[in-house]
Amino acid sequence: MDLTSNWLGMSLKNPFVPSASPLSRSLDSAKRLEDAGAAAIVMYSLFEEAVRAEEESMTRFLHHQDNGNAEASNYLPSHQDFPGELDRYLEQVASLKATLEVPIIASLNGVTAGGWIKHATEIADAGADALELNTYYIAGDIGEEGREVEQRYIEVLKKLGEQISIPINMKLSPFFSSIGNMVKRLEGAGAAGVSLFNRFYQPDIQIDSMHLQHSLTPTRSSDALLAMRWVAMLHGRVNCSIGATGGIHSAEDAIKLLLAGADVVHLCHALLQKGPQHLATLITELDEWMEQQGFEE
């Protein structure tokens, strides 16, 4: 059967695209995803705040080593001699591009406009075929209106579009007052696609120690129903690509999202749990279902 799909302006051999996960940290596991049939691979996320914290820590370390002896600076290594998280990420982008034949989509999670643009430019220069933005802003200021929050996303996207030429995919949360309108505005600002919906660590309290901890529960198939609703509502009403993510574990889950109008379906937990080979099973089952339903080859 013909499983080809168009996503972010790229022609893919099928609609299965593994989402950001630790599997892309290893060339071996990324190659296994490709061998199992992945049409493209979204890399694990680069967190801007983690990069900034690492750089600040290194700067303090080198500065403190210099205290007490004016000649110490002659013996200290340069900051550039220590590859950081950003350097490792850019190297992995280049390595995946050199090793794999499928498109590589970098994933960036940022908090400031300046950081987004700087890192996105470097990622594009490293060879990424597209960039996925994990955008999530918590409006802690109760005086800040929803329109102001939305405008943050629009402005960042516009500024990025002025700096890089590769397609930009916006991975959104479901916490907008009008999701359809927000997607339409993002499309107008230059988004090549959207992925619905992102999941985040949530704060939790450990009552025995009375300490704050972060919690992220595994997805279930029922979690995909929210995305299915909005995929169906947006299909045919926007021109940008639509990806479905979260809760897709089986071929049945994927088929529902594709019937609703998704261009691609993203998988994460199912692949971490069952391994990259699970992707081949899903592709085979989708092919068999299409044949049973009488789809033309």
Image (cartoon, rainbow, N blue to C red):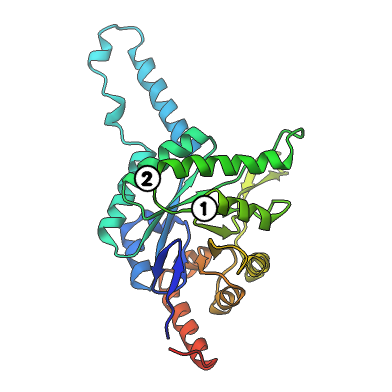
Residue 227 makes an appearance in the image = yes
Disc sitting over residue 191 in the figure: 1
Where is residue 269? Give x, y as percent.
Answer: 53, 64
Label 1: state its secondary structure. Answer: loop
Q: Classify 10 Å Cα crowding around label 2: few (below 14), some (14-19), many (20 and above).
A: many
Give the residue type at disc 2.
Answer: Ile
Q: Which residue is mark 2?
A: 123
User: Which residue is at the front of the view, 193 or 291?
Assistant: 193
Point 62% across, 55% down: residue: 184
Where is residue 145? Give x, y as percent.
Answer: 74, 38
Residue 38 makes an appearance in the image = no
Where is residue 141? Give x, y as percent.
Answer: 72, 33
The N terminus lies in which quarter of the figure?
Answer: bottom left
Q: Is residue 23 above or below residue 152?
A: below
Query: How far, Cα to Cα, is label 1 from label 2?
Result: 17 Å
Where is residue 167? Give x, y as percent.
Answer: 43, 54
Horizontal side of 285 relative to 184 (left or right) equals left
| Residues tagged 1 and 2 counted as in contact (Cβ below 8 A) | no
Horizontal side of 221 relative to 67 (left or right) equals right
Label 2: state its secondary structure. Answer: helix
The C terminus lies in which quarter of the figure?
Answer: bottom left
Disc sitting over residue 247 in the figure: none
Q: Classify 10 Å Cα crowding around label 1: few (below 14), some (14-19), many (20 and above).
A: many
